[in-house]
Image (spheres, rainbow, N blue to C red):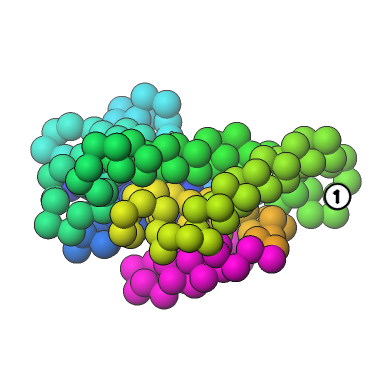
Amino acid sequence: MKLWSGTLSPFSAKVRIVLAEKGLAPEVAEIPWSRANLWGPKPAAFLAASPKGEVPVLEVSGLAIVDSTVINEYLEEAYPQVPLMPKDPAARAACRMWEDMADFLMAEYLTTLIREVFMKPDGEGRDEAAVAEALTAFNGFRNALEKRLSVHTYLSDGYSLADVAAWLCLTFSQSLGVTVGERPGIQAWYARISERPVVQAELVSVMAAAAAA
Ligand SMILES: N[C@@H](CCC(=O)N[C@@H](CS)C(=O)NCC(=O)O)C(=O)O
C-alpha cells in the first residue's frame, strides 16, 4: 500500500488519521506545499495515479484510489477490525452527512481563508467579502456541531470518520482565525478527540509543517 499525501492537506490528514487508527502504516510519498508554488512539484507517477492531480491517493494492489472519503470507506471495508462507522444504515447515512459537511467547508471555505488570510498576512488586497462569507459558513457549521455535541459524545454512534473530518475542519480553520467561541459541547468534544494519540501525533506534524511553510 502506498499513500500520496501532503502534510498540510486536510484531506490527506483525514486518511492519515484513519490509517493510523486502524494500525496501518503504508509507504508515504509527500507532495510538498509552498507559498511560492502551492502544491508541487508533482512527479509523473503521482499525476498518473491522480487524474485531478490532488492528494490523497492510496495505491493498493495496482488500483489508485482517489478522494479521501472514498479511500476511508475502502479502508473501513477492507479493515473492519477497528470500526470507524456505525453499523445501522441510518446512522451510517448521518455519519456520512457530517463528513460531507466538513469536507464541503474545507473545499469551499478553508480554501478562501488560505487564499485571503494565510497568503495575505498583512491584509493587503484581501477580499473581505469572501472572508466574511467563509466565516458565516464556519459559524453555521459550529452551531450545527454544538447542537449535536451538547447532548452527544460524538457526531455518530461512537468515534467515527465524521469526528475525524469535523475535527480537521475545526483545527485547520482555527489556525486561520476561526474561533469555537462559547460552545461547551464542541470544546469538550474537541478536547476528547485531540487526546487520541493518533490525532495528537497528526496535530504535532501539521503544526510543525505549517510553522515552516
Ligand atoms: N475531494 C478531494 C479533495 C482533495 C484536494 O482538494 N486536495 C488538495 C490538497 S488539500 C490538492 O491536492 N490540491 C492540488 C492542487 O491544487 O494542485 C478529497 O477528499 O480527497
Q: Percent from the top left, x then y, of residue 146?
A: 57, 56
Tell me the element at label 1. loop
Vertically, is 196 above or below 55? below
Q: In percent of the image, x 33 and y 36: which residue is there?
A: 93
**Three-letter amino acid code of the residue under disc 1:** Gly
| Residue 100 shown left or right of residue 127 in the figure | left
Q: Residue 192 in magenta? A: yes
| Residue 162 shown left or right of residue 65 in the figure | right
Q: Is residue 43 visible?
A: no
Q: Percent from the top left, x then y, of residue 46?
A: 34, 36
Quadrant assignment, res 73? top left
Q: In percent of the image, x 72 and y 58: which residue is there?
A: 177
Q: Is the C terminus in the top left, top right, bottom left or bottom right quadrant?
A: bottom right
Q: Percent from the top left, x then y, of residue 48?
A: 31, 28
Q: In percent of the image, x 68 and y 48: which residue is there?
A: 139
Q: Is residue 101 visible?
A: yes
Q: Which residue is mark 1?
A: 123
* Outermost residue, right side: 124
- Badge 1: how crowded within 10 Å, few (<14), some, or many (20+)? few
Q: Depth check: give the residue in front, 104 or 29.
A: 104
- Labels in figure, total: 1
Q: Residue 90 in magenta? A: no
- Is the magenta region chiefly helix, strand or loop? helix
Q: Percent from the top left, x then y, of residue 97?
A: 42, 37
Q: Depth check: give the residue in front, 33 or 142.
A: 142
| Residue 145 shown left or right of residue 35 in the figure | left
Q: Depth check: give the residue in front, 47 or 3.
A: 3
**Range of the magenta residues?**
182-211
Q: In percent of the image, x 56 and y 53: which residue is there?
A: 147
Quadrant assignment, res 182? bottom right
* Outermost residue, top side: 51
Vertically, is 59 above or below 181? above
